[in-house]
Image (cartoon, rainbow, N blue to C red):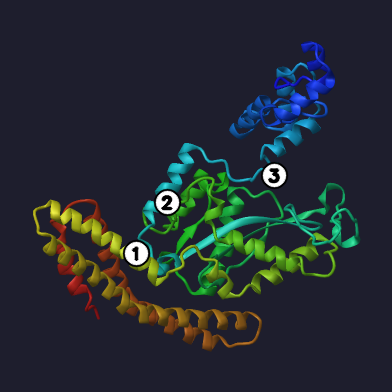
Amino acid sequence: MKDGATVRETAECLKISKSTAERIRLQEKENIGERQRGRPRKISADVVQSLKVNMKRGVLKSAVEAKDEANRLLVRPVSVTTVRRRLKEAGLLARKLVKRPALKKEHIKGRLHFVKKYREWTEDDWARVVWSDECKVNRICSDGLRYVWDDNPERITTHSVQGTVKFGGGSVCVWSCMSWHGPGYITMIDETLDSELYIKILQEDLQMSMDEWGIAKEELVFQHDNDPKHTAKITKRYLESVHMTEAEGTLLYWPAQSPDLNPIEHMWTYLKRQLGKYPTRPKSCKELWQRISAEWYKIPVDKIRNGHPVVSTYDTRRKGFQARTNVWVDRFIDSGMTKAQAKMLAETSAAAKKQLEEEIKPFRKDVTAKQTTQTDLSRKVAYGGGTYEGLRTARESLREARKALIPYEESLQQQRQLSYQLSEKSVPLVLTFITIATTTSSVG
């Protein structure tokens, strides 16, 4: 009976009556256990465990492949439905693959280099960056997933179906840029975007955006990705001719396969959501372009600033300051100083830098306020609501504010370079660092 024999089979085997065999079964019920009833499962527990391990390792990609593997191991074939049930009982659930940029080792190294290169940048440094990218907007429906809330998922209604047309219904490809000061000019790309057309966009639309923001080329850091038309030789020669290179600090280093690092992607998503609020579809690509340009210029500045890559918080800066101080203390102690001397030198160096950053804040706020004023006046003049005389006055005021800010920016940049050298090289720079820190904190 322990081996699974029935009462009748046991009685015939032992040459005893069925009642005797049944009485023995009841007396030894705890030792015998319950006999499995019904048809035994086609897939054994060992095979299910083997399929589960191979599915988790990625050796088997789907339930169909798992079914083929099970049929290879079993005597009697099983269906894919049976395999799915057994895998669910084993704790596995099927879900959609998450799509992410395919990163190779060189891509990962490039992203790490990006982080190390700009890890010392503050919010004011990132505010100088002009982010740019191209985007495609469909006339009929989005390329992404859309959801509908309903108490009956199988029911089909007019609002639960996303209508499609043959050949997609057309689309509009656009280029634009944005900065801390707001959205830049947006342009529609009617033809294939090659290097020559891209250079023309930089010469016209990027320049008009900078004029509206009141920013000179030497004051900004331009960003674009590693698209072939951006890295072509003719494009590089043009960027060098206008002094927009990484060596000069006016072109942002950009790692390959990193669209998630570009905050303008958030603005494209916001733009498409605004376009989706229209009650009717655009009748043509021309009407779609009119809606795109109208909604793009309506994007508020606060929306762009909230999507910026660097959000400065006191707690984050405090932790970073403490971590750098601990590194400096360890290096000073290795050079023969006492712990008290090392800690005092490190804290003095960091405090001087922090003091300079505090003194520069009012000047930066003044520049930002005058920048916003000039942008507003520029738009009013463009739509006939302002005067050129007021715009010239605002530009002159902004120019004077920037001149007052220059010595502070130069001192702070020198401070950062010395701080980097201090953390990377040796201790003898400490005294120079402290001397410059205490003198530059009283600039102006």
10 Å neighbourhood of mark 1: few (<14), some, or many (≥20)?
few
Q: How many marks?
A: 3
Q: Evaluate whether residue 409 shows in this view.
A: yes
In the rendered structure, the answer to whether residue 201 lies left or right of residue 61 reads left
Of residues 44 and 249, the one nearer the viewer is 44
In the rendered structure, the answer to whether residue 397 lies left or right of residue 350 reads right
Question: Residue 190, position in %: x, y?
Answer: 72, 55
Q: CA distance from mark 1 to mark 2?
A: 21 Å
Q: CA distance from mark 3 to mark 2?
A: 31 Å
Q: Residue at x 85, y 52 (%)?
A: 164
Contact flag, marks 3 and 2 (Cβ < 8 Å) = no
Q: CA distance from mark 1 to mark 3?
A: 38 Å
The secondary structure type at the circle numbered 3 is loop
Seen in the picture, residue 181 relative to 81 is either above or below; the reply is below
Check residue 96 in the rendering and tell me which mark sits there, or answer none: 3
Amino acid found under the numbered disc labelled 1:
Lys
Check residue 319 in the rendering and tell me which mark sits there, or answer none: 1
10 Å neighbourhood of mark 2: few (<14), some, or many (≥20)?
some
In the rendered structure, the answer to whether residue 282 lies left or right of residue 413 reads right
In the image, which is nearer the foreground, mark 3 or mark 2? 3
Q: Residue at x 61, y 67 (%)?
A: 185
The secondary structure type at the circle numbered 1 is helix
Amino acid found under the numbered disc labelled 2:
Phe
Mark 2 highlights which residue? 114
Contact flag, marks 1 and 2 (Cβ < 8 Å) = no
